[in-house]
Each structure stands twice: as structure tokens, then as C-alpha cells.
Image (tube, rainbow, N blue to C red):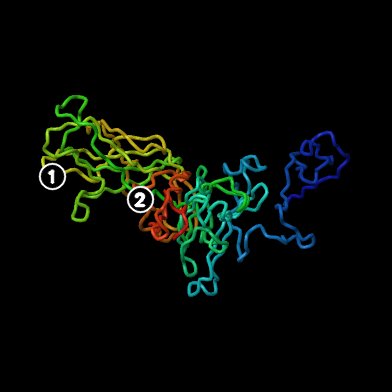
Amino acid sequence: MAEVLTFGPFTRSVSSVEAHLAPAECIAAGSQNYLVDPVAGGAFKRSGVTNATGDTINGTTGRCLNGILESAPEYVPCRLRSFKSDALADGASGGYPTPSVLYRREASATTWPAVDDGVFGTDYVRRASANYVLLSEFGSNCYPTGGGLFLGGATAPKYKVAPFWYESGDGGYSRGATEFTRRFVASGSWDTMDAGRWRYYPNLRGTPLRWDGGCNDSSSSISNDIRVIPTGPMPPAWMPTVTAGSSTGTRTSAYPWTAGDAFYYSLIYQFEDGSYSAPVIPRVPNGTLAGGYGWFVLGTPGATTYYQTIEWSNIPIGPAGTVARVLLRSRKMAMTAATSLVTVDISDLRVCGVLKNNTQKTFRDSLADDDGLLLNEDVVRFDTIVPPRARYIGTGDNRCIVGYTLPNQLAIQLAAAGRRGLRQNMDDDSATCLARPLPSTASRRLVWSCLWQTAGRLPLP
């Protein structure tokens, strides 16, 4: 038989202490918010509800008359969790965590799979003075679609969202520019995972994404950057440039490099969670790429010229969350002629330098001795993949675990490079790379990226 606990009777009122310190037999101001265990005597704050600002509650039915979301396409709340972000520090919360709810909506069980009438997913965050829905700040203040603010201006847009693919319905690509397309940002997700400042969405019916927690009260009140990019160990978008340094005709200890030294080279990113990207994959010289890609030959093979350094330049800036960039090269070979057979292993990439920042674009390499290279197969990996699309996501043993999966549809990454000069090698907060004058409207047709550097930051042509 179940034990019955009796609360009361209450013999007196106490108002000189806080409610949770009042004796079990007393009533104190605010006591209605606490339960007192009559056996152990402990006081517990009871569960309850509170209205979100702007919502109205029907006093009879207890139902919300004004919803907290932008729309209500039969959403079901499926994950309630605490949300912590640097963006909360600018509001009344003072940086403290706030509630967030993952909402989902599946296709109709009576028509699926013949008819897909919408697989939606969105994340709600309770801001200091607003009900925030992921990507809802899209507008002229954070992403000026008409140019002006940054095409020739001096301010970088706050909205940095890579176009993402979604499968549901007729399928398509979105940056969350409308209420309807924002429904697909977490399409098919039944769970989320937080790691550091990033929140991950597994997106069974779309592109697995990660969000850096940036959010704003409205499209007219923009103080925080918002970044949403695909999940995965994406490699840098291009290979650095390697050239010869100063030379001399006589070998000395200060000139350790020899004309004809040749090697493969590459680069990877290290992220703030400790993980590493995949490397840019070098290519051997061939009929299409006569000079190869990520293949370097110093000076003129067979010449008796010696060099002090190898100069790295145009080193790609990493995406938000990059804390270091690791420079790689293979062991070198000595070429005696331009037609010498290449004998070095293209996959034998070793660490030759580390830039512990995300700003430096040049590096002077005087390490000509291959024995000084670091072989680290835990850092330099060729077996990484972008994560499969999934319904569930979680953690275990310092790893990310996903369940109920489908293949990821990402196949290639492209980057906007423009039509003038070298690549726009700047971080995503730089207004300079966006303010560069473009020749004409017709010439503004750029190759668009689903990934880093300038993805989602210029108006689509």
C-alpha cells in the first residue's frame, strides 16, 4: 500500500525568514512556491509555470493565446534544455542560461512517403525581452540584401549563415530568409547536442548544422553575430602559396635548402573543441594540372643554388572557432631535372609549423631537415567524413554519437573568390573583403559556398 504524506496543519505564520527556511509547521510569505517534506523536513521549490513576455494566458483553459513561435505548423516540443551563449550577456539575463526548446514536425503518417507535406524543425530560445526563433533576425539590419551597408560600405553583416540543403517537400536550399524556409533549419532533428559554444543539429531531412549561439531580440535590434555552418571536419577552401626565399650560390648552414628540393604540402585547421579539419588534398602533376596542386619544386632542378627559407603566403583564414592552423609537408626529394620521377608519398604529410592564431597569412620555413618534421596520425587524417544525417545526437566517451541515419548529401565545397586579384582571404568579421568594389552587376556572379570564408554574406546573384 502506498505511503500517505500529510502536509499541515499549519500552526503559525513566520515572516522574519525566507520561505524555504520557515519550519514545516509554519506558513511564510511565498510559501505557496515551496513543498515541505513532513518526514525529512526539507523544503523544495515546486514546479510551476510562468508567462513568456508577450504571451497571454486564457484564465479558464490555461492555453496560450499568443504563441512563442513564428508559426504553428503542428509543432511538437521534443527537447527542453538550458541554453548558454555569449549573446545573452547583452540582455537582462546578464549572461545566465535561459530555456530553449527544440520543436519538430514530421510528415503526415497517412501520406508518407508518397506525399511529404513537410518535415520541419526549429529551435526556440527565451531571450531577455523576446521569444527568439533560430535565424529569425534575418532582415536589412543584419543582412542588407540591397547592398549599400557593405558593398562599398564599411560594416560587415551580422548574419553569417551558409546556404543549407533540405530534403523535405520539393527540397531546396535556404539561408533562413523567410519564416517558411526557417522551418527547415533543424528538419528531422529529434535532439540537439551542445559542445562549447556550439549547438549541433543532426537534421535527418537536411544538412547537419552547427550554430554558434549568436541571437538577437529582433530583426531591427542587431547586436550579435549569428553563424550557422555545416557540421564536419571541412578542409580549408584552398591551398596556401609556397615560394622560394632568399638564395645564394654557396651552401652554408644559413642556407639549408637546395635547388630541386621538392615536396607535397597542405594545411589543416584546429578548432576550439580540440578537433581538427581534414587536410586540403594535394594533387600530383598531371595533364590537367601541369604543376600539380600542393606540389612544390624549389628553384631550378639540377642548379647549384641554395636557399635560406621557404616562404608560405596566402594561408587561408579559418572559420569561426578556429584556434590554430597546422602547416604540413611531406619528406622532400631531390629533383635533378624537371622530368625526374616523383618518389615522395602524397599521403605522408607531416607537421612543419603551427600558427596559433587565425590571422597570420605568411610563414617563413627554415626547416629543411626532414628529421625535424612531426608525424602525427591522430592529427593528420584522411579517413574523416562529414557526419551522416540523423534523427538523434548525443555524446559518449568524448565522442559524438548519432542514431537513425541517412547519408550526408554534401559532396563538394565551393568558395566565393570574386573576379579581381587573389582570394578574399579575410575573417568573416572583416568589412574590407565585402567592401571591395566589384566591376559590374554582371561580373558579380561568384561561385557560392556552402562553407566558410564568404559563405552567405553577399546577396545572391
Q: Is residue 54 above or below residue 327?
A: below
Tally of marks: 2
Judging from the image, what secondary structure is the residue with disc 2 in? loop
Q: Which mark is residue 338?
A: 1
Residue placed furthest toward the right = 12
Task: Name the residue type under label 1.
Answer: Ala
The C terminus lies in which quarter of the figure? bottom left
Judging from the image, what secondary structure is the residue with disc 1 in? loop
Residue named by callout 2: 420
Q: Are there few (<14), some (14-19), or many (20+) residues within 10 Å of tag 1?
A: few
What residue is shown at x 16% (from left), y 45% (from top)?
342
Marks 2, 1: nearer the viewer = 2
The CA span between labels 2 and 1 is 32 Å
Residue placed furthest toward the front = 439
* Residue 114, x across and y down, in percent: 48, 75
Residue nearest the observer in this picture, 37 or 273? 273
* Residue 361, x across and y down, in percent: 36, 38
Residue nearest the observer in this picture, 75 or 91? 91
* Residue 210 placement, left or right of 424: right
* Residue 310, x across and y down, in percent: 25, 35
Q: Is residue 457 above or below residue 343?
A: below
